[in-house]
Amino acid sequence: MAALGRQAFQAQVGVGRWLRSLLCLCGTKTRNNLAPGSRVPGCPLHWSGEQLIPFWCCVLQVCDWHRLVPLPWARIARQTRRGEQQRTSASLLCKLTTASNGGGLEKLSRVESRKYMQEAERGTSLTRCPREKQRTPLAPGFLEREKVITSLLDVGFSDVHVNELLRLRPSPHPQQLLDIITELLLLGLNPEPVYVALKKSPQLLKLPLMHVRKRSSYLRKLGLGEGKLKTVLLCCPQILTMHQRDIDSIVGVLKEKCLFTVQQVARILHRCPYVLQEDPGELEYKFQYAYFRMGVKHADVVRTDFLQYSITKIKQRHVFLERLGRYQTPDKKGQTQVPNPLLKDILRVSEAEFLARTACSSAEEFEVFKKLFAREEEEGSASHVPDNKSWSLDEEAEEEEEEE
C-alpha cells in the first residue's frame, strides 16, 4: 500500500510539472511577440472564466484517466442518474469558473469532495438496502448438511460415496453420520472400508457415539489392537451392534469350555470374527468334533481357522475320507496307521479340488454319499454327540492320568 501511495504521489507531481511547463511555454512564446500589457490569447493564464471551463475539464479528465486523485464528480457519475450527472457537472463547472476569477480552487475542491462523497455513500447505502432485504435466509438443516458433505469430502470420501451414505435407510442425521464415520476412521479404517461397512450394516448409524467407543475399548481388551480391530470391523461390522452378553458368551465358551489361551482367543476373533455370531452350543460342539473325532489340537484349530467352516462341511468331508480309508482318528498318542491329509487340503480347497487331490473320488460318488449321510443324520439322535457320549476335555485329562 505504501508503494502504491508513493507511485500515485509521483504521478501527481509529474502531471503538475507538465501543466506548469505548458503554461510557461504558452506564455513565453506569445510574450516575445506581443507588446507589453496586452493579453496573450494562447496562454491559459490570460483566459476568461468561460474559456477556462473546457480547459479544466480536460485537465480533470486526464487526472481521472491516470487515477491520480479520487475525483468526486467521477465517482458520482458512476453511481447517479443522467439527470443528476448533468446538474452535478454544471455546478462543478460553475465552481471552476469562480475559482478561475480569483477564488480558491483547492478549498472548493475539498469542500465539494466531502459533500459529494457523502451523497455518494448515502446513495450507495440506499441502493444496497433492497438487495439485503431480498436475501432469503438459508435453513439451518441445509447449512449443516453442506458442512457434513464438505467434511466427508475432505477426509477422502468420493462424491458417489457421500451421496450413497446420505441415502442410507434408516436415514441418519447428518451430524450423527459424521460422528460415527469419524469414530470409525479413528479406529484405523480407511474411507472405502468405512463405506462398505456402513452399506453392509446401516444400523451402525443409529448407535450412540458412547456405545461405539465402549465397544471398541472392550474389543481392545480382548487383544484386538488397532490393526486387528480394523480387520474385524471390515469383515463383521455387526460386532458393534451385538448385545454385550452375546459376545461374553462366545468368549466364555472359547476360554472356559474349549480351554483356549487369551492369545489364541484373540487370534480366533481376528481371523474368524464370524464366530461371534454363532450359537455358543454349536461353537462348542464344533471344537469337540475337531478335538475328539478328528484328533486336531488347539494350535492346529487356531492356525487353520477351523472354526470358520460350517459343521456340515466339516463332517461331510471328514466322514467321506474316513469311509474311503484315507483318514483315521489318531489314538491317544496321536498316532495313525495311515497318513492323514492336512486340514488345509480338506477344508480350504474347493469341492472339485478336494475330490481330485485329497479324496481321489468322483463328484457323483460324493453326491450319493452326501444324500445317504444326511439321511443317517436325520435318523440318528437329535444330539450332536455320536453314541450319546458326552465329550469333555476334563474327562479326557482324567482318563490320561488314570492310564499313567
Image (cartoon, rainbow, N blue to C red):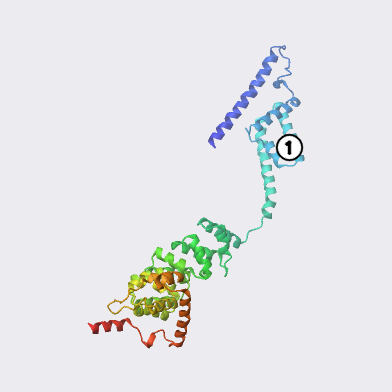
Rendered location of residue 174, percent (x, y): 56, 64
Number of dots carrying numbers: 1
Which residue is more in the foreground, 240 or 11?
Answer: 240
**Location of residue 242 with respect to 64 vertically, above or below:** below
Q: Which residue lies furthest to the left in this view?
A: 404
- Quarter of the image with the C terminus in it: bottom left
Give left or right: position of 81 versus 398. right
**Location of residue 263 with respect to 24 vertically, above or below:** below
Rendered location of residue 64, percent (x, y): 66, 33
- Quarter of the image with the N terminus in it: top right
Question: Which residue is painted at 67% across and 15% down in the image?
Answer: 28
Rendered location of residue 230, percent (x, y): 43, 64
Question: Which residue is painted at 45% across and 67% down in the image?
Answer: 233
Crowd band around label 1 with a 10 angstrom C-alpha radius: few (<14), some (14–19), many (20+): some
Question: Which residue is painted at 38% across and 87% down in the image?
Answer: 387
Quadrant assignment, res 285? bottom left
Residue 158 visible within the image: yes
Give left or right: position of 277 versus 115. left
Quadrant assignment, res 67? top right
Rendered location of residue 180, percent (x, y): 50, 65
Residue linked to disc 1: 88
Give left or right: position of 17 versus 334. right
**What amino acid type is highlighted by mark number 1?**
Thr
Q: Is disc 1 placed on a helix, strand or loop?
A: helix
Residue 272 visible within the image: no
Which residue is more in the foreground, 229 or 340?
Answer: 340
